[in-house]
Amino acid sequence: MGKPNITFRLYAITGENYHPGRSMVSVMEQAIRGGADIIQLRAKDTSKRELLAQAYALRELTRRYDVPLLINDHIDVALAAEADGVHLGQEDLPLAEARRILGEDRIIGISTHNIAQALEAQAGGADYIGVGPVYPTGTKPGRQAVTTDYVREAAAQVRIPFVAIGGITLDNVDAVLEAGATRICAVSAIVGSDQPAETARAFKQRIRAYNAHGASASSLKQVLINGRQEWTDAVTIAGLVEQYGLGAKRIVVELNGVILAREAWLHTSVDEGAKLELVHFVGGG
């Protein structure tokens, strides 16, 4: 299996305690129909066997809708259910060990609560990070909210995808988006809603509205730059070079094994999956 592209905008997490009397699969299906484009199975107080059964059921659902499925904490369940990856907390298995077990074809997300943790996860090869809890939340009782200040820090310094999470509702999501988030995770606001599809749709519309003023979901591309997976909304090679602050410097650009003349940069597009080498020459004397 190949690793799914991380192009999600609305991240939904299971929470059976928020919808008593309704099945997890039916609630998550409504969330997907409303616009959730990645699902995480999180069940802290469930036996491993029951968790695996839930994972199998959600795997069938998410395959039908072509939506990635992640498992919270349990790498063994993720492997058994053929999930697309895992989401790990700061106290879970270290990222390097998780990657060794899961390989490069599965997504690994990491919860972070400050910029130091975010940059460590990025350097360690996380595919995305969670930034939160932005507001107090019942899913993380007792944990201090990081506020939108941390969202702003992440937007300014983190170069891998990040998703804002924790206490986010339709009443406060605009403030989170204004702080620089382009991906939102909601738990109780969606799965606890009487109409999960309508609530998810409302979240997705807000996200799209804010993204329309910056990089839209469809414009973000994952490329390989100097051996590292990076995200960019650059349209041309010239734009990409400018994004990296190299426009005025002596550099050579190699695209998919071919060296590009500088005059071709403006007319050469940056496509999903492109492999680039940016070599900066430093003069001496």
Image (cartoon, rainbow, N blue to C red):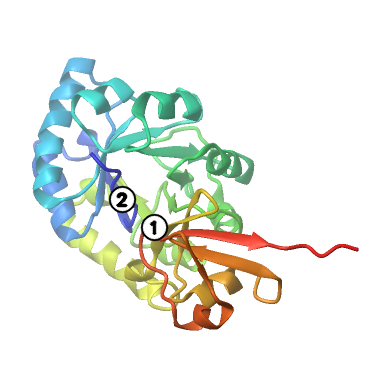
Image quadrant assignment for residue 281: bottom right
View extreme (right): residue: 285
Question: Residue 120, image x and y in percent?
Answer: 59, 39
Image position of 119 with respect to 247: above or below: above
Label 1: which secondary element: loop
Question: Residue 69, image x and y in percent?
Answer: 24, 40
Q: Is residue 226 left or right of residue 229?
A: right
Sort mark 1 into few (<14), some (14-19) or many (20+) by Cα contacts within 10 Å.
many
Label 2: which secondary element: strand
Q: Which residue is mark 2?
A: 11
Sort mark 2 into few (<14), some (14-19) or many (20+) by Cα contacts within 10 Å.
many
At horizontal 35% and vertical 62% (from top left) the residue drawn is 272
Going by the numbered disc 1, the residue's amino acid type is: Arg
Image quadrant assignment for residue 187: top left
Q: Is residue 104 left or right of residue 31?
A: right
Image quadrant assignment for residue 93: top left
Q: Quadrant of the C terminus?
A: bottom right
Compute the Cα span from label 2 to label 1: 8 Å
> For the image shown, how many numbered marks are present on the structure?
2
Going by the numbered disc 2, the residue's amino acid type is: Tyr
At horizontal 78% and vertical 62% (from top left) the residue drawn is 282
Q: Is residue 194 visible?
A: no
Label 2 close to label 1 by CB (< 8 Å)? yes
Image position of 284 with respect to 241: above or below: above
At horizontal 30% and vertical 44% (from top left) the residue drawn is 3
Of 149 and 92, the residue lying toward us: 92
Q: Which residue is mark 1?
A: 183
Question: Residue 39, image x and y in percent?
Answer: 25, 44
Sequence-first disc among 2 and 1: 2
